[in-house]
């Protein structure tokens, strides 16, 4: 089953962990995130900006985590429109379908 998640933040990471942990391999998940970086803990952004932490220490998951779960992450891509009737998400670079 194809799933498309719009937004690559903390909630998306929790949803992915839940979906892929309960029934591994059941879902083909694509995550759309408009930021070019890995998903990170926004709550910890102030300590990074203040020099107390390094940016890599607030990343939620690395690329291997997503790959191990069969998740495709589209970074730097903005979701522009959702066509519920056609079951499509139009991004700045492509059109994705879901089941």
Image: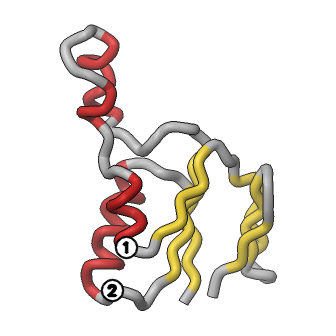
Point 40% across, 54% down: residue: 63
Disc on the earlier residue, 1 or 2: 2
Q: Secondary structure at mark 2?
A: loop
> Which label number is shown at residue 69?
1
Left or right relative to 83: residue 67: left
In the depicted view, which residue is nearer to us: 57 or 87? 57
Point 42% across, 90% down: residue: 26
CB within 8 Å, label 1 to label 2: yes
In the depicted view, which residue is nearer to us: 68 or 77? 68
Residue 52 pos. (x, y %):
19, 13
**Based on the displayed image, in which of its 4 quarters is residue 98 positioned?**
bottom right
Q: How many numbered marks are there?
A: 2
Q: Secondary structure at mark 1?
A: loop
Query: Crowding at label 2, few (<14), some or many (≥20) Cα neighbours within 10 Å?
Result: some
Disc 1 and disc 2: Cα gap in Å? 7 Å
Residue 21 pos. (x, y %):
26, 79
Residue 27 pos. (x, y %):
47, 84
> Which label number is shown at residue 9?
none
Quarter of the N terminus within the rendering = bottom right
Point 37% across, 56% down: residue: 11
The residue beneath circle 2 is 24
Left or right relative to 51: residue 34: right
């Amino acid at each position: 089953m194809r799933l498309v998640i719009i937004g690559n933040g903390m909630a998306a990471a929790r949803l992915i962990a839940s979906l892929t942990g309960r029934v591994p391999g059941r879902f083909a998940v694509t995550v759309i995130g408009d930021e070019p970086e890995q998903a990170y803990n926004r709550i910890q952004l102030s300590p990074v900006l203040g020099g107390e932490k390094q940016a890599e220490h607030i990343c939620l998951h690395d690329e291997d985590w997503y790959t191990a779960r069969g998740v495709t992450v589209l970074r730097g891509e903005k979701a522009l429109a959702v066509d519920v009737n056609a079951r499509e998400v139009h991004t700045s670079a492509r059109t994705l379908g879901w089941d």
